[in-house]
Each structure stands twice: as C-alpha cells, then as structure tokens.
Image (spheres, rainbow, N blue to C red):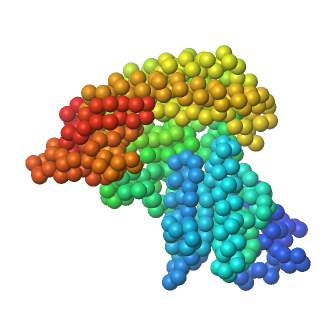
Amino acid sequence: MLPGARALRAAGLLLLPGAGPRTGAGPFTGAARRARCGPGQRPEGRRAALPAGPDLRHFLRAAAGKEPGPPPEASSAPGAAKVYLETYGCQMNVSDTEIAWAILQRSGYARTKELDEADVVLLVTCSVREKAEQAIWNRLQHLKALKARRQQARVPLRIGILGCMAERLKEEILHREKLVDVVAGPDAYRDLPRLLAVAQSGQQAANVLLSLDETYADILPVQTSAGGTTAFVSIMRGCDNMCTYCIVPFTRGRERSRPIASILQEVRMLSDQGVKEVTLLGQNVNSYRDLSEVQFQSAAAPGLSRGFSTIYKAKQGGLRFAHLLDQVSRIDPEMRIRFTSPHPKDFPDEVLQVIQERHNICKQLHLPAQSGSTRVLEAMRRGYTREAYLDLVHHVRDSIPGVSLSSDFIAGFCGETEEDHQQTVSLLREVRYNVGFLFAYSMRQKTRAYHRLQDDVPAAVKRRRLEELITTFREEAATANVALVGQDQLVLVEGPSKRSASELCGRNDGNIKVIFPDAELEDAADCGAPGRARPGDYVVVKVTSASSQTLRGVALCRTTLSRAAACR
C-alpha cells in the first residue's frame, strides 16, 4: 500500500477497488456520487465539465505531513456568480458564514443581499434543536418556488445547505424533493468552489467529512456585522465533552484549537479596522489548547474548576486559554474582549485572574448550568453536582467583583421529575442571572441520550416547565437589573434603537442592552466641541429604569475604555 494510503482510506479520500473514479478531488458519500450520474452515465463522462482540482499526490503529501500547496482557484471575472448567504443558529454559524464567504470571494464570487438576483443561495444551518432544523425545511419550501421560476426562465438557481444540519442529515437533504444542489459540513468550506462547480453541471455534490485538524487558521473571515463595531473570532472548533443531550460532537467533531499566532493576527486586523469589541468563539472556548508551538507541547494541564470532572483524561501540553486571553487583551486597550461558549469545568484561577486584572476583558461570564438537579446533571454527564456549580458561582463572584452571569437551561430532559424541575427553579432564584437562554429539551439522533435514555417528559409538561423557568428568570433578572438604577454604566454604542430613531442602543460591560436618547454630549477625553455619539463610541450612561432585559438611561458624556477604567 502506498505511504499514507491507510490514513487516506480512513479519511474517505482514497479510491478503493470497485468504488469507481471520482469527479474532481473532494470526498463524496456513495449516495451523492450516484446522484451525480444520470442513468447509464459513467462518472468519467463528466470530468471535462469540471475545473481541475488537487490530484492524489496533493493528498499523499498531506498524509505524509508535508504541506501541500493550495488547490487551484477560479479567477474573478466580470459578471461573476452572485451568492446569497443566510445564517441560522449560534454565533459560531455567524463566524462560519464569514469563513465561507471569504473562501468564495477568493474564488471569484460576488456577494448579494438581494435573494432575487442570486445565482447561489447558501443556508448556514443549526441542528441543536428540532425547531432550528424545521426552520430550514420551511425556508427550502419557499426557495423551491423561486427555483421553479428560475428554471422556467432558464436562469438556474443553485441551493446549498452548509453547517451542522448538512452534517447530520446529508442523505435526507440530497434526496428530499431533489431541491438542494450542494451539501457541505462545517469542515468542508474549503471545498465549496469545487462543489458549486459540480452543481453547475446539473449534479448534486456533497462533502461532509469531519476533520481532526481543520481550524481555517489561514482564512481571514470577511466580517459581516452591521456597522463594523463588533466582530466574532473563532479560536477553536468541536467539542470532546460528549454531554448526553448534545449533537455538537457529532456535527462539528473533536476539539482542535487554532494557532494563537493566527488569532492575534486577526484581532490586530480588526483593531486596525476600528472594531471595538471582539468575541472569541468556540463550542468549548475555555478548553482552548494550542499545540502549534513545540516548546509548549509538554506543559502541564491546568486544573479544572474545583469539584468538576471530565469523561476524558487530562490533556497535557499546549498554550491555554488564560495565555490567549492575556495576549488578545494586550493588542488594543480600547477593544472589549468577550468569549463564548465556555464550560464551567474550565475556569481555573489563572483564567479568573486575567479577567479581573484586564480592564478591557468584560466582567461577564457565561456559566451554562443546564439543570439545578444533581440527578439530572449526572444523567446529562455534565461532570459536576449542583453544589459544585454553586461553589464555582461564589468563587467567581469573589474573584471578579460585580461580574455579570448568564446561563443555559434545558426544561424536561429525559427522566426529569417535578422535584428535579423545582431544583432548577430554585437555582435560578439563588444565582439571579443577568442573562438566560432557556429551551425545552429536543432529543437529537446520534446523541448518547438517543441511544440510552427515554424522552419520557410529555411535550405539554416541557412547555409548562419552560414557561415557569422563563418567568422565574425574568423576575430575578429584573431584580438584578433594578439594582443598577442610579449607577453609571459604560456603554459601547451599536447604533439607533430599533424602536425609535431618536434613541441610541448599545451594551454595557455585562452585555445588557442599554437604550438612551440621542443627544449632543461632551467628550470627557478632550476639550472638543460637543457632538452626538456614533457607533463604536463609548458613552457613560446613568441608568434611570430597568426591566429583565433592558436598561434605560441618560447619556452623560463620551469617553474611552481606558479613561473609564482609570476613573473607577
């Protein structure tokens, strides 16, 4: 067998006897490969219609550990195909959209915000809950009518499904009404230009292989956030926690971290562009572990939060999250740093210390609890008890005075009793979160819960329990926010309020929305003439009223992040 052939075969990239030749270079499922050929056609008959891709030697060099050159890319040309992108789900999907667009832009595509003028429609999808997937199926029905009109007008429209839903339901997506032309999983965005070339010839194309090392570290995303005030930076992908309810390890694969050098390069670029807030992203962001620098590969693993455990052995070596936070926070003292989504187990003291010390790291932590019942937490394989979680909350508040907390909760998990539910209600009251994300349990295929547990809580009970959790959260969040009335809050202006053009909207350090009148303000940083605040400005706002989700106030002056920190 050729050197590296075993690795290639394991990855699904090596042609096996009897498998038939593949068009282009990327991996396809057997069903997708069959769908690309009409009755009686041989795959070879389509080769001439496709752009050249990397050959077998390209992948052999990669398997042998040698750096392959990039595959050939299409050049941009007048009248380039226009792509329309829609994003569903979490912030990671926003980041994935920017990565996919950067790849397509390099390959000569143009971006459009008008659906009717698009040649390609790509939906970046979510599979965390059934409701998220149903939204995509509904959207596809709308696109079905548009595609039929295009076919009648002989102006073809290609439709692609990207991301987690593509990974989970590739076969159903390709065969359901034959509507979708391209299916690409979260680790296959580099292959999009070739997949779209296959689709242009009238055939379906798919690549849903998960990778052990893909982080898109060399792809600088094209930022799409409105106004350019905030941006997301992906620092790691995948998750190793294997919580029983969670589909993420099966749709996004194992944990792998992006080299710190490429993260710092992207954050510097965003700073140069005037971005004032960066959110570091990952499915388990605080388990970041960069192994790209040899001298750190034998470093000891940091300790877990006290009272927490994992299903896997401690991972030795690498630069860790505390080091990354330290380096990112030094780039621009006027840029806020946030991160999401973490796991409570990965908050060693060194992480809490750097958050407390740096004025530009937001004093806001997401501590997803999921349940307030130790029995349910054990069934979820979360690795902690209710008591350990509360100990962490107290330790965080002692370490970072004034910290704002947010959390995730699931109502009606498998086997959850009324007593379990009431323990979750009591946890919401005891912790008093500022922000909450609460959902009814939705069983996902492939998860451990799907194979080992029974989804035995009736839908009506789930809805009732969810409503009770939401009501409790809002009551406690309102109380927490009312405590801020009369205080000055530093707000990063995002733009006009959606409900009134005479008001501005932004967020404070705790990530709570703040609304205030748009008026001329003095600038505390210099003696310049008064002026109106603009997106990207920091404004001191005195809070006059509060609800569970919003603060309202009066702007006092414009300032800077550094000056505001010095005046505390």
Q: Is residue 418 visible?
A: yes
| Left or right: where 270 falls relative to 568 | right
Task: Residue 451: name its quadrant.
Answer: top right
| Left or right: where 297 falls relative to 377 | left
Query: How far across and down, in percent of the image, does residue 44 sit?
Result: 80, 79
Q: Residue furthest left?
A: 527
**With respect to residue 494, does 110 lie above or below?**
below
Query: How far across and down, in percent of the image, does residue 59 sit?
Result: 68, 66
Q: Is residue 252 visible?
A: no
Query: How far across and down, in percent of the image, does residue 187 sit?
Result: 63, 56
The N terminus, quarter of image: bottom right
**With respect to residue 223, does 475 lie above or below?**
above
Query: How far across and down, in percent of the image, does residue 379 sit?
Result: 70, 25
| Left or right: where 563 falls relative to 275 | left
* Residue at x-position 19% and y-position 42%: 557
* Residue at x-position 39% and y-position 47%: 499
Q: Depth check: 295 or 207 in front? A: 207
* Residue at x-position 66% and y-position 44%: 131
The C terminus, quarter of image: top left
Q: Depth check: 18 or 249 in front? A: 249
**With respect to residue 507, does 430 lie above or below?**
above
Task: Residue 271: name its quadrant.
Answer: bottom left
* Residue at x-position 21% and y-position 35%: 566
